[in-house]
Image: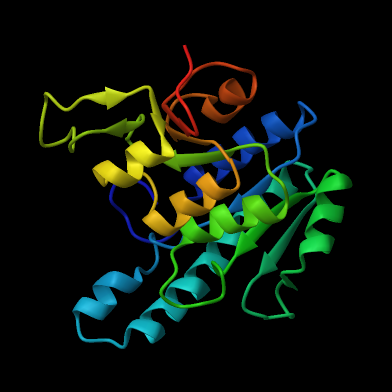
């Protein structure tokens, strides 16, 4: 979404697709996990009295809508892509099959993972960590809107909030920093998958990170230099 609007903003989808295409042109294999908060979030539904599992399933369906929008934008740029869903809906996407996903990546296709883990009570953060572990990803790039990294407080409310350039997994867990949910961070820690938290609004951010530039905050096993 853009400018506070709900739903899908074509210009935002196009920008993300273009950034992915730039990275793909570098010969890098790319898997994408999409959220659905621009359409529906489970937590507010639960607070309004909805059954939590039902609210979460609705959120999973929202991620499929976003995945299809991103797939369309990628294919307009000439990139082959596949949407794989953790909740089967074969008329619109493939079911998630790990070996098939890896084969798509080997063939140069962008794989978009939708419907989270397929289970309620788990976030798309956890889905990202799980899929990254399953496909042996080198790194998770965690895109944020308007947040250029991890802070010790909300920078929108506290002008003195401190931004971290680098953190360990244990730093995140022990300090309760809002990077990913604890389950996702623990999964990344167990599988030694670094996480780079960055602002998707920075021009060519994904390609610049892939090219070795330092952006945002990196979370990994131990701090370096």
Q: Is residue 145 visible?
A: no
Picture quadrant where residue 46 is located: bottom left
Residue that appears at 49% across and 43% down: 11
Q: Position of residue 107 (x, y in %)?
A: 89, 47
Q: Is residue 161 left or right of residue 163?
A: left
Q: Position of residue 70 (x, y in %)?
A: 61, 53
Instruction: Count the labels in the image.
Output: 0
Compared to 85, does 138 lie above or below?
Answer: above
Compared to 129, does 56 lie above or below?
Answer: below
Q: Position of residue 2 (x, y in %)?
A: 36, 47
Q: Is residue 12 visible?
A: yes
Residue that appears at 73% across and 41% down: 77
- The way the protein has been coloured in the rendering is rainbow
| 128, 172: nearer the viewer | 172
Q: Position of residue 150 (x, y in %)?
A: 32, 33
Compared to 148, does 137 lie above or below?
Answer: below
| 9, 142: nearer the viewer | 142
Residue placed furthest toward the top = 225
Residue that appears at 36% across and 31% down: 149
Q: Is residue 100 left or right of residue 207?
A: right
Compared to 2, does 36 lie above or below?
Answer: below
Q: Is residue 75 left or right of residue 157?
A: right
| 173, 89: nearer the viewer | 173
Residue that appears at 78% across and 58% down: 101
């Amino acid at each position: 979404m853009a400018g506070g609007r709900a739903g899908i903003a074509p210009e935002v989808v196009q920008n993300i697709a273009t950034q992915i295409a730039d990275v793909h042109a570098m010969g890098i294999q790319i898997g994408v996990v999409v959220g659905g908060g621009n359409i529906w979030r489970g937590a507010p539904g639960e607070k309004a009295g909805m059954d939590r599992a039902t609210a979460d399933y609705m959120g999973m369906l929202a991620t499929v809508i976003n995945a299809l929008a991103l797939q369309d934008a990628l294919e307009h740029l000439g990139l082959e892509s596949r949407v794989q869903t953790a909740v089967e809906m074969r008329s619109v996407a493939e079911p998630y099959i790990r070996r098939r996903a890896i084969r798509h990546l080997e063939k140069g296709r962008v794989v978009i993972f939708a419907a989270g883990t397929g289970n309620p009570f788990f976030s798309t953060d956890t889905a990202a960590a799980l899929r990254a572990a399953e496909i042996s990803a080198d790194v998770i790039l965690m895109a944020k809107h308007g947040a250029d990294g991890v802070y010790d407080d909300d920078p929108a409310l506290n002008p003195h909030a401190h931004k971290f350039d680098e953190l360990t997994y244990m730093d995140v867990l022990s300090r309760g920093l809002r990077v990913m949910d604890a389950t996702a961070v623990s999964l990344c820690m167990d599988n030694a998958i670094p996480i780079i938290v960055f602002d998707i609004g920075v021009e060519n951010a994904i390609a610049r990170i892939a090219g070795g530039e330092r952006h945002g905050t990196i979370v990994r096993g131990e701090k370096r230099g």
